[in-house]
Image (tube, helix red, strand yellow):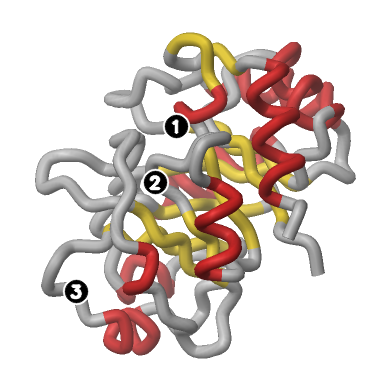
Amino acid sequence: MLTKVKICGITSIADANAAIDAGADAIGLVFYRESKRFIEISEAIEIVRAVGPLVTTVGLFVNEPAESVELICRKVGIHLAQLHGDEDSNYCAKLSIPYIKAIRMAPDIDLRQQALEYPNASAFLFDAWLPDQYGGTGTSFDWRRIIDIDDKPTILAGGLSVDNVREAVALTTPYAVDVSGGVESSPGCKDKVLMAQFIKLAKAI
């Protein structure tokens, strides 16, 4: 099965359509106000409406109240929530919508414990770790640390670009890869050429 590609940090209809035209399987919309790629709910609604119901849309949240995540996803029409903060099992148990749990690859993290912590996760996303940042670091990590967790789909993120995505896919054989800054001309502005190259390379193996 070809590796799926999610283009995250979409901030405009034009970039969303360009990502889909390039072959993206999913787009990500950031609802974390500290992010350079944050968008308002009204903007997200327009983007989701423009791409239509057959494109998977993912909302990225960081330590947002569970009730707020549910409300935003339903109001915007988002298919999946991506939890990128310190959300624990009690938090996730409150959600009735499907979710991806991001795992920031801290040096001492126990990946087996993560499987027990989030049994209802639709997938696990592995991202680089910095103590004061929740994703969007532009840095990578040792991909050899990734393991299959509870037979869940694995999504690789963190510092991916046209320069390393083929190597990353060959080494980890993930279900999907997730990219944001690696296909941008500036924060929040996607580059059509880079997106097309990235997707082609990710799906080449």
Q: Position of residue 189 (x, y in %)?
A: 55, 12
Position of residue 74 in the picture relative to residue 94 (left or right):
right
Label 3 CA crowd tier, 10 Å (few <14, some 14–19, many 20+): few
Q: Nearer the viewer, residue 153 or 198?
A: 198
Q: Nearer the viewer, residue 163 or 50?
A: 163
Residue 71 visible to the viewer = no
Label 2 CA crowd tier, 10 Å (few <14, some 14–19, many 20+): many
Q: Nearer the viewer, mark 2 or mark 3?
A: 2
As drawn, 98 above or below 113? above
Quarter of the rendering containing residue 106? bottom left
As drawn, 122 above or below 40? below
Q: CA distance from mark 1 to mark 2?
A: 18 Å
Q: Residue at x 51, y 68 (%)?
A: 171
Residue 38 visible to the viewer = yes
Q: Residue at x 71, y 17 (%)?
A: 192
Assign a secondary structure to mark 2: loop
Q: Residue at x 33, y 48 (%)?
A: 140
Q: Position of residue 18 (x, y in %)?
A: 78, 20
Assign a secondary structure to mark 3: loop
Q: Nearer the viewer, residue 22 or 203?
A: 203
Q: Position of residue 79 (x, y in %)?
A: 69, 51
Name the residue carrying label 1: 31
Report the amino acid beneath label 1: Phe
Report the amino acid beneath label 2: Gly
Label 1 CA crowd tier, 10 Å (few <14, some 14–19, many 20+): many
Q: Which mark is residue 158?
A: 2
Name the residue carrying label 3: 109
Report the amino acid beneath label 3: Ile
**Who comes first in sequence, dot 2 or dot 3?**
3
